[in-house]
Image: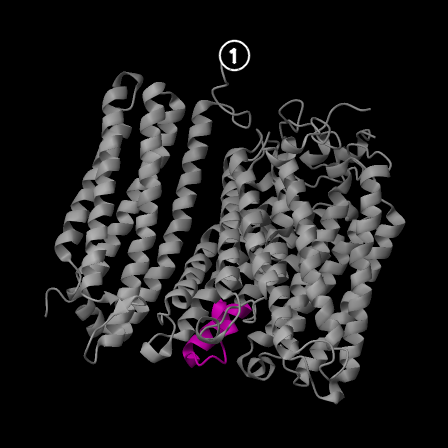
């Protein structure tokens, strides 16, 4: 048995559920997120099975409404938003900056309990009968007409929001105050720049959602018309408040993925990230400009043409920093010594899928095209390319890359590559046909459709089956590796980041001695290669 | 018994810990600003749409209690600031009394708020419970009172949390005041001042429209 690490210090149940160790809290989050991912995935499966035929043969329209609402709410708030920040971020932020823990370890544990309370509340709403409003809770349907458990679901999301806020707050303070000696801002791994930008959004946008949900619950509970046009209330005000949070939330769901891809592309090209400062500031630019584009969700809502023009323009502007990132990853690959290890396959898949998702986002930012594509499968395909093709792929890539550090074990490279390739093909087969369906006019959120759309829907459902298998595979080979895999060396990728300079898995106190940083990040091609491997 | 360490192991010194805690509280206040900001945005949208109704609604609020409560809250904030200023092991007694005094003023505020609410209930001005208002401005007045109740209720919840914080600090600080309590007091004071500032905004938005021109 090797020296004690954070996994072996204590085996009792309370040492897990009362831990303040950021690494163990990351594991708690990880386990919870797998659970929610499968619940959201089950709803998606039911949706795709229903859509395999034009008729309604599996569920009624009412149940279908509840299925896609459940899929959206669970996946957005209980998987995507906490995914990379709360698992990989929780685990890696202190390790990457050479700190003993996050600034507020007890707050970190509290945020997990709040998250679980919010998750259980939402689960209760689902088990009690579900919600049929869509994840967007649009008024006046959600306040006046829906007969489902809107207040309970809104309460669940409201509660989970505080977990987001506390995590974001913890990351910002930690990155500001706990960096190791010599670790200046421009020496930070780019993963931390993107987590920092993400945290800013978490802290500044989430409270607006909180107060909006509070108003919804008040309106429903007391029967007062805050957004009810009959007494002069404005349903559009709800949409403004909702998207003021929910569009920045899209960047909460992609920035951490971009951060992970920086680390992977650099490591498996054996080169520093091209244009470090541009990539770093691009993250903050996305976070800042991302607050000014929410109206592009409302082009057909009846908002003024001037507003639509400005929001359209800003949506084009926010594409610039995203494009900078894609170009810089490509430039990083250029003349790199590229290794196609499993994490790199995920990173490359991310770049391709994110580019498609981003470019179709520009289509939708065009006022004229958006009028045609609003509420069609084109929009569905677009945001799934960003969130699933982008974020979930990056999450899997990061999970594989840091798996040896987290568990101290190596996984099967063969199976990992198989899963990566299957995910890429399964994903494209699922969602590319939806672009075509949307362009041809198939609206979202219906469980029946004209027969001429069936070919593309069958392809999409077939792809979803492949995707489901591909997402299940890591459960098996990563699960096997966690218990029976070969022991991982401290630095299996021969990477210069601080997290690789401690043992795998790290000891409870992270580092035996306080690390001191003396060089720029990503120095793959210089002195580092000459050093002996810790293996 | 071994002394507990003065600061947790992720920090390098006591000032390091205290500055970190303070930054955390400022960020929390930033998040709170956006929470109230969303609410104020809704208020401004509706006030812009129904200026006369909002002026009319405002004239039905109790400006006497509102003004007294503003004075009470400002005094309470002053006591907390005083406690932060004079905090030292030698001034335990006065700090304790200042904090208890500030918390008591907070409770008086809540009590007056309750009296104000019951007055509005008697005047049938509580939307969703009992709201009767005649005339063409009724709908806008109802929107005003929805905002009034939601905003003051959220503010009151913040007050209650602040009162608990002040009382807990008064109790633990009395036993063994350390630098840690000073840092905690400093953060709690920031929070208490923030709640105070929110009230200043609410006071102006709730009680003052329509008072000068009737």
Up/down of A20 relative to A269, above or below: above
Quarter-of-image position of residue A49: bottom right
Q: Residue extending furthest top?
A: B1
Please report the bounds of the magenta region as a residue range: A292-316
Q: Is residue A285 visible?
A: yes
Residue A21 inside the magenta-drawn segment: no
The chain letter for the residue carrying disc 1 is B
Q: Is residue A29 found left or right of A248 in the rendered image?
A: right
Helix, strand or loop: magenta stretch: helix
Residue at 54% in and 34% down:
A105
Q: Position of residue A307 (x, y in %)?
A: 42, 75
Q: Position of residue A244 (x, y in %)?
A: 46, 64
Q: Which residue is mark 1?
A: B2
Q: Position of residue A130 (x, y in %)?
A: 59, 66
Residue A304 inside the magenta-drawn segment: yes
Up/down of A491 relative to A201, above or below: above
Quarter-of-image position of residue B173: top left
Q: Is residue A265 visible?
A: no
Residue at 55% in and 49% down:
A117
Q: What colour scheme was applied to this rendering of the protein?
A: one colour
Q: Is residue A457 found left or right of B75 in the rendered image?
A: right
Image quadrant containing the N terminus of chain A: top right
Quarter-of-image position of residue B79: top left
Q: Which type of secondary structure does the marked residue at label 1 adopt? A: loop
């Amino acid at each position: 048995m090797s020296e004690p690490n954070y996994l072996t210090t204590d085996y009792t149940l309370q040492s897990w559920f009362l831990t303040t160790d950021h690494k163990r809290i990351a594991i708690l989050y990880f386990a919870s997120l797998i659970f929610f991912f499968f619940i959201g995935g089950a709803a998606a499966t039911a949706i795709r099975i229903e859509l395999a035929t034009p008729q309604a043969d599996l569920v009624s329209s009412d149940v279908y409404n509840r299925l896609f609402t459940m899929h959206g709410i669970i996946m957005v708030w209980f998987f995507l938003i906490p995914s990379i920040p709360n698992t990989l971020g929780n685990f890696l932020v202190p390790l990457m900056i050479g700190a003993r823990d996050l600034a507020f370890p007890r707050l970190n544990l509290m945020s997990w309990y709040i998250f679980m309370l919010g998750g259980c509340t939402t689960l209760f709403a689902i088990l009690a009968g579900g919600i049929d409003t869509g994840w967007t809770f649009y008024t006046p349907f959600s306040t006046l007409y829906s007969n489902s458990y809107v207040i309970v679901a809104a309460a669940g999301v409201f509660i989970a929001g505080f977990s987001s806020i506390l995590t974001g707050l913890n990351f910002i303070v930690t990155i500001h105050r706990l960096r190791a000696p010599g670790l200046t801002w421009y020496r930070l791994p780019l993963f931390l720049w993107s987590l920092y930008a993400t945290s800013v959004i978490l802290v500044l946008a989430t409270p607006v959602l909180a107060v909006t949900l509070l108003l919804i619950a008040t309106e429903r509970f007391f029967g007062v018309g805050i957004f009810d046009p009959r007494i002069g209330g404005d349903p559009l005000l709800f949409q403004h408040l909702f998207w003021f949070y929910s569009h920045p939330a899209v960047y909460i769901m992609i920035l951490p993925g971009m951060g992970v891809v920086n680390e992977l592309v650099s490591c498996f090209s054996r080169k520093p990230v091209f244009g470090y400062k541009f990539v770093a500031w691009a993250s903050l630019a996305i976070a800042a400009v991302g607050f000014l584009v929410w109206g592009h969700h409302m082009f057909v809502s009846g908002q003024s043409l001037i507003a639509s023009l400005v929001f359209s323009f800003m949506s084009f502007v926010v594409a610039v920093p995203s494009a900078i990132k894609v170009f810089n990853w490509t430039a990083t690959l250029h003349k790199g010594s590229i290794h196609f290890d499993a994490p790199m396959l995920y990173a490359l898949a991310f770049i391709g899928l994110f580019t498609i998702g981003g470019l179709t986002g520009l289509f939708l930012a065009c006022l004229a095209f958006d009028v045609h594509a609003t509420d069609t499968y084109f929009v569905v395909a677009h945001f799934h390319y960003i969130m699933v093709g982008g974020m979930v792929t990056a999450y899997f890539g990061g999970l594989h890359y840091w798996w040896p550090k987290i568990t101290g074990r190596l996984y099967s490279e063969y199976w990992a590559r198989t899963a990566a390739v299957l995910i890429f093909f399964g994903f494209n087969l699922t969602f590319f046909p939806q672009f075509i369906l949307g362009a041809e006019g198939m609206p979202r959120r219906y469980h029946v459709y004209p027969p001429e759309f069936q070919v593309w829907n069958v392809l999409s459902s077939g792809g979803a089956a492949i995707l489901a298998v591909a997402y299940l595979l890591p459960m098996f080979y990563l699960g096997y590796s966690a218990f029976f895999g070969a022991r991982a060396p401290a630095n299996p990728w021969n990477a210069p980041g601080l997290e690789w300079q401690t043992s795998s898995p790290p000891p409870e106190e992270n580092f035996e001695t306080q690390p001191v940083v003396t060089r720029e990040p990503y120095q793959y091609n210089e002195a580092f290669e000459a050093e002996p491997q810790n293996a | 018994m071994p002394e507990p360490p003065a600061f947790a192991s992720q920090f390098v010194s006591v000032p390091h810990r205290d500055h970190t805690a303070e930054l955390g509280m400022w960020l929390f206040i930033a998040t709170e600003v956006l929470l109230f900001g969303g609410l104020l945005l809704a208020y401004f949208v509706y006030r812009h749409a129904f200026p006369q109704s909002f002026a009319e609604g405002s004239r039905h609020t109790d400006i006497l209690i509102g003004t007294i409560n503003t004075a009470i809250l400002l005094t309470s904030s002053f006591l907390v600031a005083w406690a932060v200023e004079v905090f030292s092991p030698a001034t335990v007694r006065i700090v304790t009394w200042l904090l208890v005094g500030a918390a008591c003023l907070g409770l008086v505020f809540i009590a007056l708020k309750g009296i104000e609410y019951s007055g509005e209930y008697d005047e049938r001005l509580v939307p969703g419970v009992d709201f009767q208002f005649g005339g063409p401005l009724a709908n806008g007045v109802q929107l005003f009172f929805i905002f009034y109740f939601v905003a003051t209720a959220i503010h009151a919840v913040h007050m209650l949390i602040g009162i608990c914080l002040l009382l807990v600090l008064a109790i633990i600080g009395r036993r063994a005041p350390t630098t840690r309590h000073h840092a905690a007091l400093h953060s709690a004071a920031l929070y208490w001042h923030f709640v105070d500032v929110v009230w200043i905004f609410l006071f102006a938005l709730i009680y003052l429209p329509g008072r000068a021109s009737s």
